[in-house]
Image (cartoon, rainbow, N blue to C red):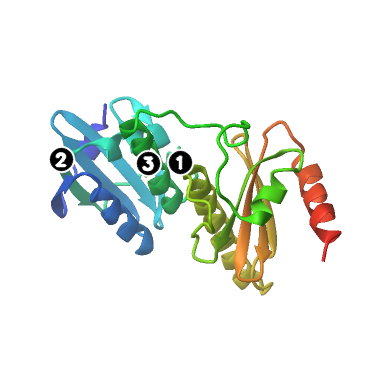
């Protein structure tokens, strides 16, 4: 149930949604560093998406919260939304950046429409087209998946849902690293390692590209990073 203080706030701009045009509003609010909420209604369902400085920090819908609630809202085929700039929350149930969340929502819906379930990236199943560097990385113990991406976040060669999601994470991580580099006068990010909520990720700068790497949860992030540097450092 939504809190009454949320339900009774003054409505701002209202608009209709069909399919996923709500995603365009979410992207715009991210670019504008919006703080507030978007309330969404579809038939008898109600949901809320909360922003802080352009980041989605929380979502709730019929007792669900976090990413699950956000993806459920984005699945709705229609409804009404309202911008609520005065509605905020102290709860943080979502850590991922906006671009990753929207790509993941599209991936989930594509798989549902196709009657598919997500495939484990390194399950030894169907071969996927990918960059040579990503194929080399998959041979290193502990590497779950890897993608070469352009500076704008576009995956190179690999068009799979896994690649798009991992590229979006890499783009978010590079953006954060570059902002911190600007603040401390350290320049652009050259490499980064992240462990959060059971996910491990590595990012490397590669001239005009980045390499985004998902590391298996049970593997040592430090050891995998060391193995990658040793493998690629040994070749010209």
Residue assigned mark 1? 94
Of circles 2 and 1, which is in front?
A: 2
- Which residue is rendered at x = 61% and y = 61% of the image? 210
In the rendering, at what x and y percent does residue 100 appear?
A: 45, 49
SS assignment at label 3: helix
Of circles 1 and 3, which is in front?
A: 3
In front: 60, or 178?
178
In the rendering, at what x and y percent does residue 17 appear?
A: 17, 46
SS assignment at label 1: loop
* Mark 2 neighbour class, 10 Å CA radius: few under 14, some 14 to 19, many 20 or more: some
Of circles 2 and 3, which is in front?
A: 3
Residue assigned mark 3? 105
Residue assigned mark 2? 79
- Which residue is rendered at x = 84% and y = 54% of the image? 230
Say which quadrant the C terminus sits in: bottom right
In the rendering, at what x and y percent does residue 14 appear?
A: 14, 51
């Amino acid at each position: 149930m939504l809190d009454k203080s949320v339900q009774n706030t003054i409505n701002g701009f209202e608009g209709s949604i069909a399919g996923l045009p709500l995603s365009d509003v979410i992207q715009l609010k991210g670019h504008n560093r919006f703080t507030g909420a978007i309330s969404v209604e579809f038939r008898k369902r109600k949901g809320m998406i909360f922003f802080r400085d352009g980041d989605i920090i929380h979502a709730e819908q019929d007792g669900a919260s976090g990413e699950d609630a956000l993806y459920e809202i984005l699945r709705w085929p229609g409804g009404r939304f309202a911008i609520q700039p005065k509605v905020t929350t102290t709860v943080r149930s979502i850590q991922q950046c906006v671009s990753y969340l929207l790509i993941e929502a599209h991936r989930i819906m594509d798989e549902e429409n196709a009657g598919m379930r997500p495939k484990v990236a390194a399950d030894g199943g169907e071969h996927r087209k990918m960059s040579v560097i990503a194929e080399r990385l998959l041979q290193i113990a502990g590497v779950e998946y890897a993608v070469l991406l352009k500076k704008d976040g576009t995956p190179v060669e690999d068009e799979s849902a896994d690649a798009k999601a991992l590229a979006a994470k890499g783009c978010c991580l590079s953006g954060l690293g570059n902002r911190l580099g600007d603040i401390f006068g350290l320049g652009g990010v050259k490499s980064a390692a992240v462990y959060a909520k059971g996910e491990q990720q590595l990012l490397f700068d590669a001239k005009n590209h980045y390499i985004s790497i998902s590391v298996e949860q049970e593997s040592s992030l430090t050891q995998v990073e060391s193995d990658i540097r040793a493998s690629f450092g040994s070749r010209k």
